[in-house]
Image (cartoon, rainbow, N blue to C red):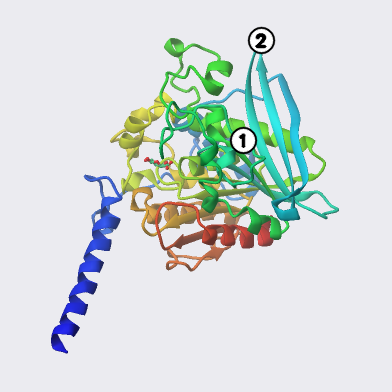
Amino acid sequence: MFTCQFSRNGFVLFLLFFITLNAASAQPKGYLYDEQKVRHYTLPNPLVCEDGSTVTDSMVWTEKRRPEILRLFEKEVYGRSPGKPKHIEFQEFEKDTNALGGKAKRKQIQIKLCKDDKALEINLLIYSPVGTKKPVPGFLTINFHGNHTVHNDPAIKITESWVRNRNGIKNNQARQEDRGSSSSRWSIEQIIDHGYMFATVYYGEIDPDFDDSFQNGVHGLFSSSAEKNREPTEWGSIAGWAWGLSRCMDYIEADPVIDSQRIAVMGHSRLGKTALWAGAVDPRFAMVISNNSGCGGAALSRRKFGETVKRINTSFPHWFCDNYKKYNDNEDGCPVDQHMLVALAAPRPVYIASAEGDLWADPRGEFLSALGAEPIYRLFGYGLGAIKQPSVNEPVHGRIGYHIRNGRHDVTDYDWKQYLKFADLHL
Ligand code: GTR
C-alpha cells in the first residue's frame, strides 16, 4: 500500500516537473521571466503634453495629446504609412449563399491596389449569417497562413503568395492539404451563430514576412523611396499589414450588407501588434482586439520581461521603422511605451488578451498597459473594471477588456467567447 502511494506521488511529482520544464522551454533562454527581478522604471505620462501642460478633458486629449502620441509612434516605432492609393478595385470573384452547412453566406473579394502599371492583390474572405435584414457588425481578422487555413471549406481560394515553410510546406507555396490547418484559432461557426460577420485576410499577401529590404509586398509598391534612401521613419511590416487592414475596411465601407460602423479589428501575436496599430491609425475600426500581442504590442517595453526591444529588432529587423532600433537596450529613452498605444484606441472599446503560459509576451506587462491606458478612458467616463491583474480565466469586460487564460500562446475558443461577449456589450 505504502509503495503504491509513494510511486503514485512520485509519478505526480515527475509529471509536474516535466510540465514545468516544458512550459519553461517554450520561452527562449537568457531573458527575464521572474517578476521579482523586474527593475524599477518610470512610464511616460500619456496625459502630459509635449509643452508640459496636463490633459484634463477628453477634448484636449482628442485634439492635442492624441495626435502627439500618434506621431511619436509613427516616428519612433512603426513608421509612417502612405495614404489610401489612388486606384483601388474590388472584385467579388466567388460567392455562396448556402455556406457552412447553410448557416452562412460566403464571399471572396479581390482587392486590387494599383500603382502605375503594377498592382498588389489581396483576397478578403467573408462569412456572414443568413437571414439578417440589417447590415451586420463583425470582426475583421488577419491570419498567418492563408485564408484557406482558417476553415476546411473547399471553396476558399488557396493563396498564391509566399507562405512560410512549415509542416512540410516547401518552396513557400500553399497546398491543398493545408486547408483548415489553423481552424482551431477561428471560431467561425460560433461567430456566425452569434450574429456577427467574420472576415479575414492573409498577412503574407499584404507583405511577405521576411526581411528582403522592403522589396516585395506593399513596401515595394507604395514606398516613396528605395531601400538605400529609406528614411528612419518609414513604415515597417507591422505598419504595412495594418495598412492592408485599412484597405479591407475600404471594401467593407462599400459593402451595404456589412455594418462598417461596427467592425472590430482582431489579430494574434505579431498580428495582435498589427491590430493595435491598425486601430490607432484608422478610427474607422470601432473596436480593437489584441490577442497575446507581447513586445511591440500591448506589453510594456520598459519592463524588459520576456522578449525585449533589442531582441525583436534583431530577430525581425523589418517589423518596425529603423528609428525603433535606437531603443535597443535603451527602452527608457523612448518617448512612448505601449500603454500609450492602447490609449490611442480610446474611447473605443479595446481588448487585451494574455495567456498564462506565454511568458515571452509578458502577460503582466500586457495587463499593465491596459491599466496604464485607463486614465485616458476615464476622461470619457469609461474604465477597465480592475485595479489589479485578474486571476486566470476571470475576464473583465469594462470599456477596456482584459483576460489571462490558462494555456499557451495561441487563439482559442475561450478567447473568442470573451470577444463575443465583449462585442455584445460594447460594439
Ligand atoms: C515571436 C515573436 C513575438 C510574436 C510571435 C508571433 O517569434 O518573438 O514577438 O510576435 O513571434 O507572432 O507568433
The residue most toward the front is 177
Tell me the quarter of the picture where residue 22 sits: bottom left
Report the residue at 77% width, 43% height from top. Answer: 96
- Residue 240, percent from left and from top: 54, 28
Q: Of 371 and 380, which appears nearest the observer? A: 371
Judge whether residue 425 can be spotted in this image: yes
Type of amino acid under label 2: Asp
Q: Which mark is residue 245?
A: 1
Q: In front here: 219 or 342? A: 219
Q: Which residue is mark 2?
A: 117
Q: Are the residues flagged by discs 2 and 1 in contact, CB closer than 8 Å?
A: no
Q: Secondary structure at mark 2?
A: loop
Task: Indicate the secondary structure of the residue bearing disc 1.
Answer: helix
Where is residue 81, by image quadrant? Answer: top right
Q: CA distance from mark 2 to mark 1?
A: 23 Å
Residue 381 visible in the snapshot:
no
Circle 1 Cα neighbour tier, 10 Å, few/some/many (<14 / 14–19 / ≥20): many
Q: Residue 105, position in %: x, y?
A: 76, 47
The residue at 52%/62% (across/down) is 414
Image quadrant, ligand 1: top left
Percent x, y of residue 331: 33, 38
| Quadrant in the picture for residue 354 | bottom left
Which of the labelled discs sits on residue 109, or is there none? Answer: none
What amino acid is found at the position of numbered circle 1 in the picture? Answer: Leu
Give coordinates of residue 145: x percent, y percent.
51, 38
Compare marks 2 and 1 and give the one earlier in the sequence.
2
